[in-house]
Amino acid sequence: MNKLASIYFLQGLGLPTIFPHIITTHDERALRAEVDSFYFDYEPGWVLRCGELPKKDSRTERWLPWDVARGKEELIRKVIELQREIGRYFVFCHPVQEMVRGGIMLIEGDKVVVEAARGEPRELSAFYRGSRSPEQQILFNPGMMHPKRYGSEVLAPSDLLELRNVERTLDWSDIGAISDPVSVEFSWLKDGRFYVHDLSVVN
């Protein structure tokens, strides 16, 4: 499942996630009109990500570039630059999520492993990409009960209730993960909100 497919899948389940705007044109005049249709000034900026159109049977595109833009003109300029770099892929964007904590939940059968870390958005992005070690690891018994914790405390017991809700909300048959492990990326934002922003089948 690629990036956009996973986002729309999470939206369909009613889980808190992002709402991306896909850039559909390479013509600069049409691009400006498209950006005008959704853009609003937002001090933390806008994230620009790249990927294919939604496909459930595609892998997550972790190798593609991403960027952050502050201001409409910078967003337009960076979209054009990314389009030149990525060829057949699409650019999509959404407001920066001001993450302060985040992690990855790996679900494999009745085993669940959660790895978590603190940091600014770029630090957490490095963690999600495997360039930074977790600060906390949590191992669960079946049903996500009686966790064993290792490392410093990043996630409180109340946070684990959010993750338990995600695990119980996922429809395994819809994502073709009856036998394959599933990886879920999640974050808590500066304002306290929880959201899920990537889901992939590990095969």
Image (tube, grey):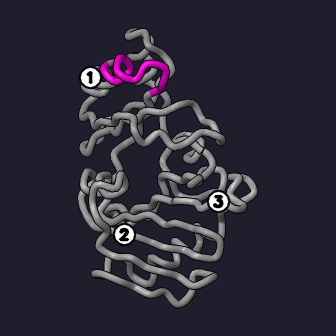
Q: Is residue 194 above or below residue 80?
A: below
Residue at x-position 33% and y-position 63%: 191
- Residue that lies at the very extreme toward the front in this rendered image: 203
Q: Nearer the viewer, mark 3 or mark 1?
A: 3
Q: Are marks 3 and 1 in contact (CB under 8 Å)?
A: no
Mark 1 and mark 2: Cα distance apart in space: 35 Å
The mark nearer the N terminus, 3 or 1, is 1
Depth check, front residue: 113 or 124: 113
Q: Which residues are magenta?
A: 81-90
Residue at x-position 30% and y-position 27%: 75
Residue 171 in sight from this viewpoint = no
Q: Nearer the viewer, mark 1 or mark 2?
A: 2
Residue 174 in sight from this viewpoint = yes
Q: Which residue is mark 3?
A: 180
Q: Is residue 109 left or right of residue 86?
A: right
Depth check, front residue: 77 or 87: 87
Q: Is residue 55 left or right of residue 159?
A: right
* 138 in magenta: no
Q: Is residue 71 left or right of residue 49?
A: left
| Label 2, residues with CA under 10 Å away: few <14, some 14-19, many ≥20 | many
Mark 3 falls on what kind of element?
loop
| Label 1, residues with CA under 10 Å away: few <14, some 14-19, many ≥20 | few
Residue at x-position 43% and y-position 19%: 87
Q: Is residue 191 above or below residue 155?
A: above
Residue 51 image offset from top left, x and y in percent = 48, 33
Mark 2 falls on what kind of element?
strand
> Which picture quadrant has residue 65?
top left
The mark nearer the N terminus, 1 or 2, is 1
Give, as a three-letter code, the residue at label 1: Glu
Mark 1 falls on what kind of element?
helix
Q: Which residue is mark 1?
A: 73
